[in-house]
């Protein structure tokens, strides 16, 4: 029996959760689309878009590992690709955060932001890439690392989505784009 078989329920739960949360992000963005914040679109690319990326990464990896592969080699190669792409994207997000922090009119991230939006996602994707590298040698151990990385990505996405929405809500931005003083 393939080591992936005993993980099927886990990946179905994680993938379903990631898919539902991705859809919820689209609903929330649609509901607040008429509001304008002082940060604009570049804040969305630094703080909003990564949430959808993390949810989609969890969904994609879950779907890949729930598929009925004839050989673990295909799943291993796909895991490596997912890990490398995730690490690259996390590096891009860190660069965007640094760029946004340098702008005077922009939101200045605090330590919690650097951790949740920058460091934790980077760590999750590094863990995914490392697990992918050891997957063929020891799939049982690697699947525990992958599972932890995917749960971390879900938790990061939930935390960051909540953080972003509460920031927008507490800014009390009116539909005409002026802050409610």
Image (cartoon, rainbow, N blue to C red):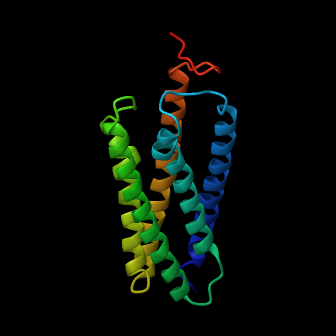
50 lies left or right of 176 = left
> Which residue extends farthest front?
104
Asked if residue 11 lies left or right of residue 85, the reply is right
As drawn, the residue found furthest toward the top would be 181
Residue in the picture at 39% in, 86% down = 137
Name the quadrant containing residue 123: bottom left
Give the image location of residue 179, x and y in percent. Answer: 53, 16
Task: Indicate whether 160 appears above or below 38.
Answer: below
- The answer to whether residue 160 is visible is no
44 relative to 178, above or below: below
Q: Residue at x 48, y 35 (%)?
A: 163
| Residue in view at x 55 percent, y 18 percent | 172
User: In the image shown, does 145 or 78 lie closer to the viewer?
Assistant: 78
Above or below, 39 against 87 in this view is above
Q: Position of residue 11 (x, y in %)?
A: 59, 65
Q: Quadrant of residue 30?
A: top right
Looking at the image, which residue is at 54% across and 81% down?
Answer: 75
């Amino acid at each position: 029996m393939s080591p992936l078989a005993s993980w099927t329920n886990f990946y179905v739960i994680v993938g379903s959760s990631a898919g539902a949360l991705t859809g919820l992000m689209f609903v929330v963005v649609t509901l607040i689309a008429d509001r304008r914040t002082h940060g604009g679109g570049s804040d969305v690319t630094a703080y909003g878009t990564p949430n959808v990326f993390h949810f989609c990464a969890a969904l994609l990896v879950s779907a890949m590992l729930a598929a009925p592969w004839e050989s673990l080699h295909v799943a291993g190669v796909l895991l490596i690709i997912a890990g490398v792409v995730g690490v690259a994207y996390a590096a891009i997000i860190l660069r965007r955060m640094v760029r946004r922090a340098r702008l005077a009119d922009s939101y200045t991230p605090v330590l919690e932001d650097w951790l949740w939006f920058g460091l934790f996602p980077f760590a999750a994707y590094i863990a995914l890439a490392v697990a992918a590298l050891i997957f063929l040698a020891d799939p049982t151990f690697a699947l525990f690392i992958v599972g932890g990385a995917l749960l971390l990505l879900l938790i990061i996405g939930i935390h960051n989505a909540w953080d972003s929405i509460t920031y927008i809500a507490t800014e009390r931005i009116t539909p005409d784009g002026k802050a409610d003083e």
